Image (cartoon, rainbow, N blue to C red):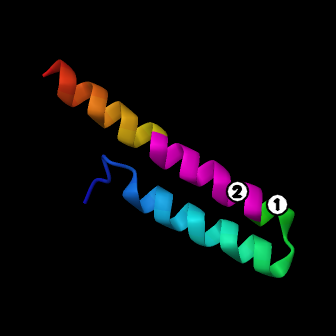
Amino acid sequence: MEDKHGIKDKVAGKLKEVEGKITGDKAREVEGKAQQAKGKVKSKATEVKEDLE
């Protein structure tokens, strides 16, 4: 299943961010934030595409 709305990236990113905060792993925390941003971009791109149709 294709994740056009970025939901998987948003959720997985949040989990990584929280894991990084709990374990003190700044790299994991940043990775999670980046993945969440990727999900937000996918979501916005889908909105724009739907608006153009």
Would you say the residues marked 2 and 1 are in contact, meaning their CB atoms lie under 8 Å apart?
yes
* In the image, farthest residue toward the left: 53
Q: Residue at x 84, y 70 (%)?
A: 25
Residue that carries the numbered disc 1 in the rendered image? 27
Please state the horizontal and vertical placement of residue 34, each as a whole percent of the image: 65, 49
Q: Residues within 10 Å of mark 1 (few under 14, many from 20)?
A: few
On-image quarter of the N terminus: bottom left
Please state the horizontal and vertical placement of residue 9, each as a whole percent of the image: 48, 57
Look at the magenta stretch and give its main secondary structure.
Answer: helix
Q: Residues within 10 Å of mark 2 (few under 14, many from 20)?
A: some
Secondary element at tag 2? helix
How many numbered marks appear? Answer: 2
Please state the horizontal and vertical placement of residue 2, each as a whole percent of the image: 28, 53
Q: Quadrant of residue 27?
A: bottom right
| Residue 27 on the magenta segment | no
Bounds of the magenta segment: 29-40
Which amino acid type is marked by label 1? Ala
* In the image, farthest residue toward the top: 52
Q: Residue at x 58, y 61 (%)?
A: 13
| Residue closest to the eye, 1 or 16 | 16
Secondary element at tag 1? helix
Please state the horizontal and vertical placement of residue 19, each as a whole percent of the image: 70, 76
Q: Above or below — where is 1 with respect to 50?
A: below
Q: Quadrant of residue 51?
A: top left
Residue that carries the numbered disc 2 in the rendered image? 31
Q: Residue at x 87, y 74 (%)?
A: 24
Q: Above or below — where is 2 with respect to 15?
A: above
On-image quarter of the C terminus: top left
